[in-house]
Image (cartoon, rainbow, N blue to C red):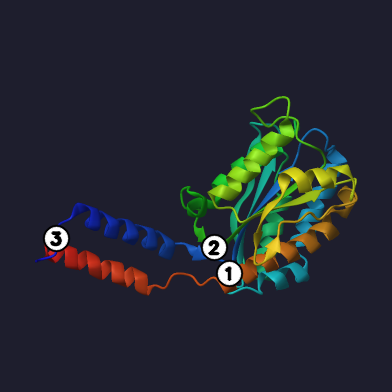
Amino acid sequence: MKANYNNPINYGLVLFTLSGLANKALSIEVDTELILLVDVSGSVDSTEYSNMMNGYQRAFRDSSVLDAIQGGKTGSIAASVVFWSGANDQQIGVDWTLINDASSANSFADSLSATSRPFSGMTAIGSGISFGADLFGSETGGAGNGFESIAQIIDVSGDGTDNNTPPDNSNRAANVRQARDAALAAGVDMINGLPIGNAGGALEQYYIDNVIGGSAGGVDAFTQAAIDFTDVESTLVKKLQREVSAGAVESTAIPEPSTSLLLAAFSSLILLRRNR
């Protein structure tokens, strides 16, 4: 019996496979896609904001962070910065940027220095996580962002607990956990926390209980607390080393699909067309 190559389901499946692999081939492969969610709510005054942003800039100029970035299969990451405050206050500060050497790391730091603070309102950690999760592109079901990776990591900084994430007004912590769990279910691998102030105290425990989750490269999600805003640089350096290294291990451990899959799908498409 002759096989039915005219089956539209088979033909559609090959087209879907070709489309997905073609999009992947057009994207830049990196070890980790990292979103930095930066708290700019009203509790962060102008001096604290300045200290925090200087810390972020200097952290990406640190050679130990670059060493961690270059330790993976591709020796590169894609990073983006999102400013967040209230439930409807999220804005991309620095769009997705390839970091693979000192020049690109310094360029990313320069882009951070050129940003302006967009908000100073309520504190909606969960809303910030939801916004960030959508930016990873195909890995979390969204439109492509120009990069493909095995590890997708969100890094949340903040100096207070949530008071504005919907829907439940009486239990904001539950809303944060719901946003965290939804992000992980969508494909985010790990959400880490950088609580600022009260290191080892109630704020850090809040992040442990409600904000962080997932794992990458055998490393469970973690908090790295800063004593205050002047401590952001040294804390972020340690934190970036840990999460970027975790992403590097993840990318090395899980091989990317071979380009032979694209050739096989293309051959199948030709065969189907010949038998129509």
Gap in angstroms between the C-alphas marked 3 and 1: 39 Å
Dot 3: element: loop
Badge 3: few (under 14), some or many (20 or more) residues near its Cα, within 10 Å?
A: few
Picture disc at residue 251: 1
To which quarter of the image does residue 4 belong? Answer: bottom left
Whether tag 2 and tag 3 are in contact, CB under 8 A, the answer is no
| Residue that carries the numbered disc 3 in the rendered image | 4
Q: Give the mark nearer the N terminus: 2 vs 3.
A: 3
122 or 172, which is in the foreground? 172
Whether tag 1 and tag 2 are in contact, CB under 8 A, the answer is yes
Picture disc at residue 149: 2
Residue 254: where, in percent of width, then height?
A: 54, 70
Quadrant of the rendering where the C terminus is positioned: bottom left
Picture disc at residue 144: none
Residue 167: where, in percent of width, then height?
A: 64, 28
Q: Amino acid at mark 2?
A: Ser
Q: Can you tell which of label 3 and label 1 is closer to the viewer?
A: 3
Q: Amino acid at mark 1?
A: Ser
Vertical placement of 177 versus 137: above or below? above
Q: Amino acid at mark 3?
A: Asn
